[in-house]
Image (cartoon, rainbow, N blue to C red):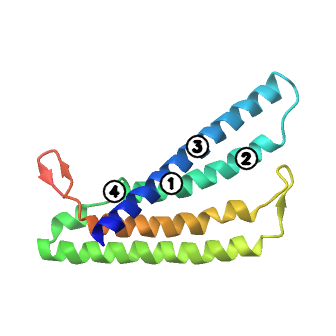
Amino acid sequence: MKALLFMLDKGVFRLVSWVTQLLLLSAVAAACYQVVARFVLQSPADWSEAWSRAALIWTVMLGLCLALRQGAMLSVDVVRLWVGTRTQHWLDVAVLLSCLGFFGLLAWLGGQMAWRVRFQTMPSLEWSISWVYIAIPIGAVLAMLGLLARWMEKPPAAVVGATQL
C-alpha cells in the first residue's frame, strides 16, 4: 500500500511539475510576443495579456503545491528552538493542521468563486473566467496533498550552519 501511495505521489507531482513549467514557459512567450507586437509591429495582441495572467495564476497555485511537497516554503523556526523535543512534535502537528485548515478554506471559497463566475467570459480569449478561478481550489487541494505527503515522509530536520533545526 505504501509503495502504491509513493508511486501515486511521485506521478501526480511530476505531472504537476511539467504542467507548471509549460504554463510558465507559455506565459513568458506570450508576454514577449505582446512586447514585440506592441512596440515593433505597432499592432498589440489582445489575447496575450489575458493568457499571461491566467497562466501565471495557474503557475503560482501549482507551484505552491510543489514547494510544499518539497518542503521549500519559508518557515520561522524560532519557536521550535525554544521548546523541547516533545513539544516540537505537537507544534509541528498544530502547524500542519493550521495549514490544512487554511488550504481547505481556500479550496472551498475558491470553488464557490469559480462557480459564481462561470458565466462570465474573458473577452480577449472568449473563455469562461472560471477556468482561471478554478486554479485556486485545485492548487489548494494539491497543496493539502503535498503537505500530507511531506508529513508522512517525515524528512530529516534541516541543518543551518552547525545548528540542527
Distance from Cα at disc 3 to Cα at disc 1: 10 Å
Q: Amino acid at mark 3?
A: Leu
Q: 12 or 88: nearer the eye?
A: 12
Q: Amino acid at mark 1?
A: Val
141 horizontally vs 122: left or right: left
Earlier along the polypeptide chain: callout 4 or callout 2? 2
Percent position (x, y) of residue 39?
Answer: 80, 25
Residue on which disc 4 sits: 71
Distance from Cα at disc 1 to Cα at disc 2: 19 Å
Which quadrant of the structure image shows residue 136?
bottom right
Q: Amino acid at mark 4?
A: Gly
Mark 2 crowd level (few <14, some 14–19, many ≥20, 10 Å Cα)? many
Q: What residue is rendered at 45% in x and 78% in y?
A: 101
Which quadrant of the structure image shows residue 22?
top right
Q: What residue is rendered at 55% in x and 58% in y?
A: 61
Q: Does dot 4 land on a helix, a strand or a loop?
A: loop
Distance from Cα at disc 4 to Cα at disc 3: 22 Å
77 horizontally vs 74: left or right: left
Q: Does dot 3 land on a helix, a strand or a loop?
A: helix
Percent position (x, y) of residue 19?
Answer: 56, 49
Residue on which disc 3 sits: 22
Q: What residue is rendered at 55% in x and 53% in y?
A: 60
Q: Does dot 1 land on a helix, a strand or a loop?
A: helix
Residue on which disc 1 sits: 16
Mark 3 crowd level (few <14, some 14–19, many ≥20, 10 Å Cα)? some
Earlier along the polypeptide chain: callout 1 or callout 2? 1
Q: Amino acid at mark 2?
A: Trp
Mark 1 crowd level (few <14, some 14–19, many ≥20, 10 Å Cα)? some
Earlier along the polypeptide chain: callout 4 or callout 3? 3
* The C terminus, quarter of image: bottom left
Percent position (x, y) of residue 59?
Answer: 57, 51
Res 51 label: 2
